[in-house]
Image (tube, rainbow, N blue to C red):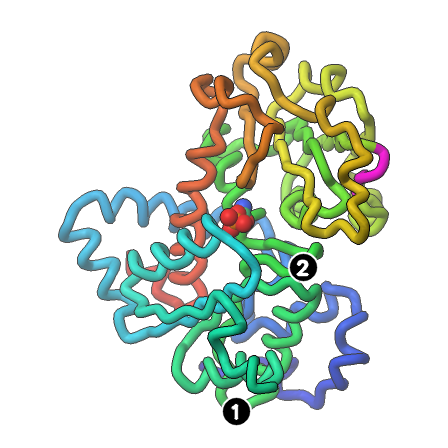
Amino acid sequence: MQRTSAMTSVQPDWENFYPRPISEKIPFFSKDGRLYDCLFAQQFNRELLNHLFETANKLKTVTHRKDGADHVSSLLSDKRAMLYFVQPSTRTFMSFLNACHIMGIKTSEIRDTTTSSEVKGETPEDTVRTFSSYVDMIIMRHPAPGFVEKTAWLMNRTGRPVPIVNGGSGKDQHPTQALLDVYTLYRSFAGEIDNKHIVMVGDLKRGRTVRSLSYLMKSYKGIKLSFVSPKEFRMESDILDFLRRHDIPFTETEDFRGVMKTADAIYMTRIQDEHDKSGESKAVDYSPFHFRQEHLKEIKKTCVIMHPLPRRHEIELSVDDDPRAVFWRQERNGMWARAALMAYIFGVDKKL
Ligand code: CP
């Protein structure tokens, strides 16, 4: 694969590179004008999103038949991927693993640093570079903000880079979750995401899914966002500034009932107390930010109820039976959206 001039030019050291605006950094993570490392939601534009969604739709359809599934699993049968997930995950890990299997990619995994040579004092950077000796792609979830990006940056400076895919990094980004979230909107609204009112609810301060989803909204016209959260967990100012810069109107409120009536999509999230420094989540009453059975009669007939999952109590179990509850479908969409992304990164998307 030919490398772009941006990647082969002299690059600054990490400390100078990391604080740069993401728009300036994107070329370092692209090759031949295509996304190569998938690190930030801002790397997706409308054209690429539509292409990935159509690719995911094709994958779903083609693999229904055995001959189709066999064809798809031959497309990347010469590739191997490492899943390095050192922060807990069920669905991101499982959906990437199964997306690899759909595409024929062979996989290996580390899910606990105590089983890697990091316990002998090897740096995480050296550990990840070691994977690239054996595989053609590294898919990562890591608790440290910026570490996935740093890995991609380091790899792109070696003579043997492999694509790095961000499966969730610290509190900052979860770009493939945003990809599957928008794919779910795309399928729910027959491709018409423009002019929708999207309500995000819960711990917006520490939820990386709502951050990445907010970034993707710049690809659509006439979007209106409502952020519903306890005052302690309001959306961070960098996201609000991004929305202002892109003329995306938003409101912030604690009145969930007040905004749900006009919502086209309600995106619920759980409290992210794993990020607590000293048990601060316990002091917050989260119950006004729950979706209950009684709310079903308040919302539009066409509204969809989403959740990146896992959930605790923020959506009552009985809501699952309502056809507007699409979060289980959303979870399955993740596997197809991620398979489409891998097909694109390895350049076999046109062979479907
Ligand atoms: N939505 C999501 O990232 O789920 P997991 O933490 O289970 O991967």
Label 1 sits on residue:
159
Q: Three-letter amino acid code at disc 1? A: Gly
**Is 67 left, or right, of 221 in this rendering?**
left
Q: Nearer the viewer, residue 68 or 313?
A: 313
Label 2 sits on residue:
170
User: Which of disc 2 and disc 1 is earlier in sequence?
Assistant: 1
Label 2 Cα neighbours within 10 Å, binned few <14 / some 14-19 / many ≥20: some
Label 1 Cα neighbours within 10 Å, binned few <14 / some 14-19 / many ≥20: few
On screen, 334 above or below 137?
above
Q: Specify the farthest residue to the left.
A: 67
- Residue 76 seen in the current view: yes
Q: Three-letter amino acid code at disc 2? A: Gly
Foreground: disc 1 or disc 2:
2
- Which region is colored magenta? 231-235
**Is 339 left, or right, of 230 in this rendering?**
left
- What residue is drawn where x is 54% and y is 25%? 304
The secondary structure making up most of the magenta span is helix
Q: CA distance from mark 1 to mark 2?
A: 28 Å
* Residue 85 located within the stretch drawn in magenta: no
* Residue 232 located within the stretch drawn in magenta: yes
- Across and down, in percent, residue 173 comes to 65, 56
- What residue is drawn where x is 55% and y is 22%? 316
- Across and down, in percent, residue 208 comes to 67, 50
Q: How many marks?
A: 2
Q: Secondary structure at mark 1?
A: loop
Q: Quadrant of the C terminus?
A: bottom left
Q: Nearer the viewer, residue 83 or 345?
A: 83
Q: Secondary structure at mark 2?
A: loop
